[in-house]
Amino acid sequence: MQSYDVVIIGAGAAGMMCAVEAAKRGRSVLILDHAAAPGEKIRISGGGRCNFTNIHASPKNFISRNPHFCISALSRYTQRDFIALVERHGIAYHEKTLGQLFCDGSARQIIDMLVSEMRGRGAELVLSTRVETIGKTAEGFELTLSTGSVSCQSLVVACGGKSIPKMGATGFGYELAERFGLAVVETRPALVPLTFDAKTLERLSPLAGNAVDAEIACGKTRFSEAMLFTHRGVSGPSILQISSYWREGDEIRIAMLPGTDVAELVRAARRGNGRQAVQTVLANHLPKRLAQAIAERTGLDGNLADLSEAQIKTVEVAVNDWRIKPAGSEGYRTAEVTLGGVDTNSLDQKTMQAKLMPGLFFIGEVVDVTGWLGGYNFQWAWSSGWAAGQAC
Ligand code: FDA
């Protein structure tokens, strides 16, 4: 049986960062993955350009039952540290919007960077390898793999969440945590498009493909970014963001001209030309088909001159206080991340080590720390992977 100081399950973002850091400390490291290539989610991320961090990343951009848990790792390995690594490898990047940093070239550059860092430090990467059994020993852990058996002092679980099962995502990390007695906070798909019921879709599906810059609110949380009508419901950055806060039965509130006094807009248009239709005025500010749908929904398709104050208010509400209860979400099939995961109360926030099982570490998405859309989830993978890498 081959023996290592550290075995890492999952050669994704967090696992590879941890492997680099542990190997830097002189630890013998084996990092394994059941996939045929490392960092598959990095490869497809950010439309193939990998939104690898966010300039503004701070603990307030993360959702967790314990919002303080992520502070230590995020402040010890920051976005500036990762940017410095990217720059050392000569990878060109740019800020797209809202502090989101993307590669100018390809996401593969980030994978190549991590693989070359791992290899340069002597970490051993094995692919297409399944973990069959894991046992606790006095010295650490013994694993039966599809390729043989290994033992280690420290076992790092970095196998990600359940999103995109067709890429090999499983609930393995959560099952492992439960098997070793750690609590798991209920998991659900997040950063995911929301769906409407059949009746609503009948009315709204002709709008599929239209996008607006909207403000979406759910409870006290709100996001202002693009919203896209789809054949199933709504998507786009603002919807993905709010989906992490939305629960079945909640209504979302949509402002399609946020910051605009729509009633005053209509009154001003009426003063200019009372013989135009509501949808004509709205079409100056919204996609034409959407303007038409709003006019139809409110039943106000006559001239502006004929509108009462109450009817003008109806238009305002339809545009800027549209309330709708999504029927559900598109689920793990398209979700970017998994909300919930290994309960942070079970882990040490400085090292990511299980409090009741020394030598067992959980990092990245499998932990109950979920970032907003915009490079935050990779930053959590880098920071938590780095933190465990200093201790495993
Ligand atoms: P990750 O999923 O990266 O890695 C887990 C690894 O474990 C995988 O390689 C998997 O094959 C392996 N594994 C799983 N089960 C195993 C088992 N039983 N045995 C062995 N290996 C196993 N975030 C962001 O910040 N910016 C972005 O641009 C994007 N874009 C994006 C697009 C899409 C389409 C998705 C689905 C997700 C994103 N994300 C993102 C989210 C980001 O990809 C995600 O949060 C990180 O990859 C999480 O890193 P981890 O290392 O924790 O898991």
Image: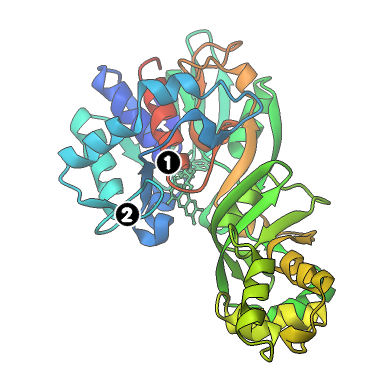
Q: Amino acid at mark 1?
A: Phe
172 or 61, nearer to the observer: 61
Q: Residues at badges 2 and 1 in contact (C-beta under 8 Å)? A: no
345 shown above or below 331 = above
Q: Position of residue 385 (x, y in %)?
A: 41, 29
Label 1 neighbour load within 10 Å: few <14, some 14-19, many 20+: many
- What's the CA distance linking mark 2 and mark 1? 12 Å
Q: Is residue 194 left or right of residue 371?
A: right
Seen at 77% across and 83% down, the residue is: 296
Q: Quick check: can you spot residue 163?
A: no
Residue drawn at the location 63% of the way across and 87% of the way down: 273
The colour scheme used here is rainbow
* Residue corresponding to mark 1: 378
Residue 117, above or below 189: above
From the viewer's perspective, is 110 left or right of 277? left
Can you name the residue that lies furthest to the top here? Answer: 138
Q: Could you tell me if residue 94 is visible in this image?
A: yes
Which residue type carries mark 2? Ala
| Secondary structure at numbered mark 1 | helix
Image quadrant where residue 220 sits: top right
Which residue, given by chain and number where applicable, does mark 2 sit on? Answer: 107
Please tell me which of labels 2 and 1 falls first in the chain.
Answer: 2
Q: Residue furthest bottom?
A: 275
Q: Which numbered circle lies on residue 319?
A: none
Mark 1 Cβ inside 8 Å of ligand 1: yes
**Percent x, y of residue 226:** 53, 62
Is residue 383 toward the left or the right of residue 104 in the image? right
Please identify the quarter of the rendering in which residue 331 is found. bottom right
Location of residue 214 with respect to 18 vertically, above or below? below
